[in-house]
Image: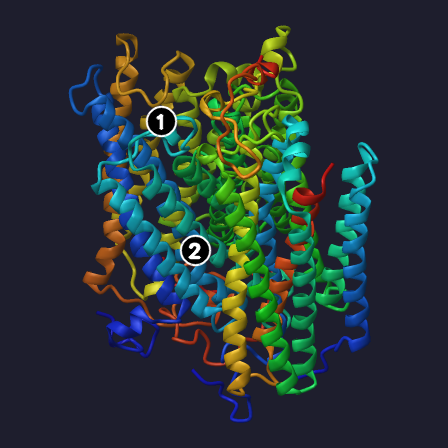
Amino acid sequence: MSNHNPDAPKHLKHYFANVDQQYETSKFAMWAFILTEVLTFAGLFVAYIVFRSWYPDMFVDAHKLLDVNKGLMNTIVLITSSLTMALAIWAIQKNNRKLSLIMLIATFVFAFCFLGIKFLEYSHKFEVGQLPGEYYSYMGPEVVHLNNPHIFFSIYFIMTGLHGLHVAIGMGLIAWLIYATYKGNLSSEYYTPMEMIGIFWHLVDLIWIYLFPLFYLIG
Amino acid sequence: MIENIKQNYLNHPKGLMSWLLTLDHKRIGLMYLVSGILFFFLGGLLALVMRMELAAPGNDFISNDTYNNVYTLHGAIMIFLFIIPAIPGALGNILLPLMVGAKDVAFPRLNLASFYIYSFGALFAMYTIINGGVDTGWTFYTPYSTQSTSNVVPMTLGIFIIGFSSILTGLNFIATVHKMRIPGLTWYKLPLFVWALYGTSLVQITATPVLAITMVLLMLERFLGIGIFDPALGGDPVLYQHFFWFYSHPAVYIMILPAFGIISEIIPVHSRKKIWGYKFIAYSTLSIAFIGFLVWGHHMFTSGQSVFSQIVFSFITYFVGIPTGVKIFSWILTMYKGQVSFTPPMLYALSFLFLFTIGGLTGIFLGAVALDIHLHDTYFVVAHFHYVMQGGTIVAFLGGLHHWWPKSFGVMYNQTIAKICAFGVFLGFNGTFFPQFLLGLRGMPRRYATYSEEFVELHSYSTFWSGILGISIFIAIMNLFWSFIKKNKVDPGSNPWGGMTLEWTHTSSPPHPHNFEEEPVLEHGPYDYDKVIVEKTYK
Amino acid sequence: MSEHHITPLRTYLIIAASLLFLSGVTVWVSYVDLGPLNIVVAMLVATIKASLVAFFFMHLLWDDKKNLTMFLMSLMFFGIFVTITLLDTEFRGDLDLNPEVKDPINKRAAFYDTLPLTDTHGHPVDEHSDNHHEDKDHH
C-alpha cells in the first residue's frame, strides 16, 4: 500500500504521516523490546543471586574452574564488535556505504570469534564433565569439598547459553544488514533497520558486561 | 453477506489470500475474535464436564486422573488461549487505531505475525489435548510438573510461543498509542479504552518475558535435571512459584484492565453523560499496572516462603484494591443523573459492577494471611477468581461485543434475545459461583473430583446454574453471529448508541479498509455529552 | 529526513578505549581481595561500562527521553523482582525455632555419593581411601 503523496519516499509506509514519525516509532518500539530482553535475563540473574546467596562458598570456589583469559578475550572481542557496529551506523549516516559494509563485516567476524571462543570453553567443559544438572560428573580436587557444584554450572550454561543464542541471532541479523547495505537498500536517507539491530547488538554486549564479572571474576 | 454496503474492510480486498496475508488490523482483530470464541467454547465445555462430575460425590462421570487433566486444560485454555490473547487481540486490534485516528497500528506486519504465532502456539495446546492431556494444574508447580508423565513439555512450549504473540501485540499497541495519535488528540482526550489497552500492553511486555524464561527453566529441569527447582538436587520448589507468579499475578491485570476500559466506554455512552473522574480512571489504570507487580506472593501464603515476605506481600496487596475501588465509584457517579438506557451493553456493564465488586472484595479477604491460610486451595479462591475473571472480564467482553458489534460489522443483533441472555448470564453466574464461596468456607478443596456428603447440596446448585450460564453465553454469542445471517444491516453512517469517540463519529459501519477517508479533525472530547449533542439512532 | 544527531567519531573511539581499559581494571581488581567489597567493586565497574554503552553507543544521551525511561523502567522491574524474592529466600524459616528447618536447603544432592572422584581432566581416579570427603559437609 503506497502513500498517497507521490513525492513520499518508497520506504515510508502509508499509515505513517512522515519519515520522522516512522523512524522515531521504530526506535521507541525497539527500546520497548529491549525492556522485554532485560526482563528475560532478569529471571536468570535472580536465579544466580538466590543460589549464590545460598551457596556462597561453592560459587567462589567453583568459578575458579572457568578460564578467565578466554572470558577476557570474549569481553574484548564483544566490546570491539560494539564499536564496529556503532561505526557502521556512523558511516551510513555519512552516506559512506562502503565503510559501513566493512564495519558490518568486521562486526560479524568478531561475533563469530566470540562464539568460537565460547565453543572452545564449552567443549573443554564437556570433556571434563563440568556439565549442568544430572549430567555433572567432574569431581576433581577443587570441588570435592563443595556442595552441589552442578548448580553453578547449570546456571553458567543457561545464562551464557542464552547469551550465546542472542549472539547467534545477532549474527543472522547483521548478515541480513550486510546484504541490504550491499544491495543499496540502506543509505543516509533510510538506515532505520541498521540502527535497530545496532541497539540489539549493544544489548548483547551489555549483558556480557555483567556476565563476565559474575561468573569469571568473583571472589 | 453485506456486499451492498459501500467498500468496507470486510468486502475489500476480496479473496482468501487477502485474509490470510492481511495487514488490516480490523481483519486481524476479527480473526482473533473467531479463534478466541472457539477456545472460549472449548474451555467452557471442559468446565461443564467438571460440573457434571461434581454434581454428585463419587467418580461416576470421569475418573480422578481425567478430572486432573480437565481442570488443567480448562485453566490453561481459558487463560492462555482466550482471555489474555483474544480480548486485547480482538477488540483492541479492531478499535485502537480507530480510536486514535490512525490508519493502522504502528507495525501491521508484526500484528499479523502475532496472530500466527498465537495460532502456532495454540497448536501445541491442541496436541496436548489429543495426546492425553496434562494433569499438573495450569500453574505447573514443581516438583510434580518436572516428574509428571503427562504432556507438560508440549503445553509449556505452546504457552512459551503464545507469550511471544502477547509481547509483540503489547509492543505494537504501546508504539501506536505513543506515536500515532492525530494532532490535537492529547493523552487526556483519549478514550479510556485506549488508556486501558496502554496499561495492559505495559504489563504484557514487562511480565511475559519472565513467564517465557520460567517455562524454559521448567523444560530444562525436565530434560537436563538442572536442579534449581528440585530439592533433591539442592534446588527450591518455592523459587519456581516466585518465577511463575511474578508473571501470573500481573497477568490477571492483563485480563481485567481491558475489561475496565470497555466498561469506561459503555457507561458514559449508555448514560449519555460525561465520564466522572476521567483522570482518576486513567491514573488508576497505571497504578494497578504498577502495584500489580509487587504482590505476587499472595498466591504463595502456604508455600513455605518466609513470614517476613508474607507480611510484605499482604500489606501491599491491600493497596492494589484502592485504584480499582476508585474506578467503581467513578462509574457509579457517571450514571448518577444520567439518561440511562437499559440496552444489552448497559445490562452487561451493570452486571459487571455487581459481579466484579464481589470478586474484588473477596480478593481482599484472601489478601489477609490469617484468612488465606484456611481459604487457600479451597473453593473460596475458585469463586473469587471466577467472579473477577468471568463475572468481570467475560461479562465486560460480552458487553463490549454488543456495544461495538454494529460498528464493526454493520449489522444489528436481536435486542430482545440479547437482553434475555444478559439476565441469564447474570443469574446463571451467581447461581454457579456464589455457592462456591460457601463451599470454600466450609472446607471444600479445589481440584478434587469428589467430596464428602456434606457438600452435595451446594454443589448441585452450582452444577444446575452452570447449565443456565453456559446456555445463556452460548445463545448470546450465537445471537451476535446470527445477525450476519439475518442481514439486519445498519446504515453505514449510523451511531446507534450515540457514541462520541472517533470510531463512532468518523468511520462508517463497518469501517473503510483504511479507516478514514481523510485524517479526522478532533472536534470535542471523548465524552463531552455536556457540550455537544450527538444523535443516537437506536430507540 | 530531519537532522539526526550524528555522534562524532572521536567520541566513539574514546568510549571504546574506556571500555577496554575498564575491562582490564575489573580483571586486575579481581586479584585483590577486598572481602565483601569484591562484588560491590565488580558491579560498580560493570555498571560504569554499561552506562557508557547505553548512553553513547546506544545513543540514549541524545535520544528522546522516552527511550531512556523505557530502559530505566526495565531495570526498576528487575530490581523489584530481585529484592522481593530475596525477602523470602534470605529469611526462609524465620519463624521456625527448629534450626534444622531454618536452613532447609539440601546441601548435597544424592547423586554425588555415587560419583567417582576425578582428576583435573575429568577422568575417574582410583581411590582406595578419602571417602570421608563426602561426609564433611553433609548435614
Q: Residue at x 62, y 61 (%)?
A: A31
Chain of residue at mark 1: B
Residue B356 vs B267, above or below: the answer is above
Residue A95 in sight: yes
User: In the shown orientation, is residue B149 left or right of residue B58?
Assistant: right
> Where is residue B430 drawn, in percent x and y?
35, 29
Which residue occupies the extreme left position in the image? B60
> Where is residue B531 drawn, in percent x and y?
60, 62
Front in this rendered view, residue B70 or B491: B70
Residue assigned mark 2: B165
Distance from the alpha carbon under mark 1 to that under mark 2:
32 Å
Residue B274 in sight: no
User: In the shown orientation, is residue B76 left or right of residue B238?
Assistant: left
Q: Secondary structure at mark 2?
A: helix
User: In the shown orientation, is residue B276 left or right of residue B116?
Assistant: right
The N terminus of chain B lies in which quarter of the figure? bottom left
Chain of residue at mark 2: B
Which amino acid type is shown beneath numbered disc 1? Phe
Q: Secondary structure at mark 1?
A: helix
Q: Residue at x 76, y 45 (%)?
A: C43
Residue assigned mark 1: B433
**Count of picture labels:** 2
Q: Residue at x 81, y 72 (%)?
A: C11
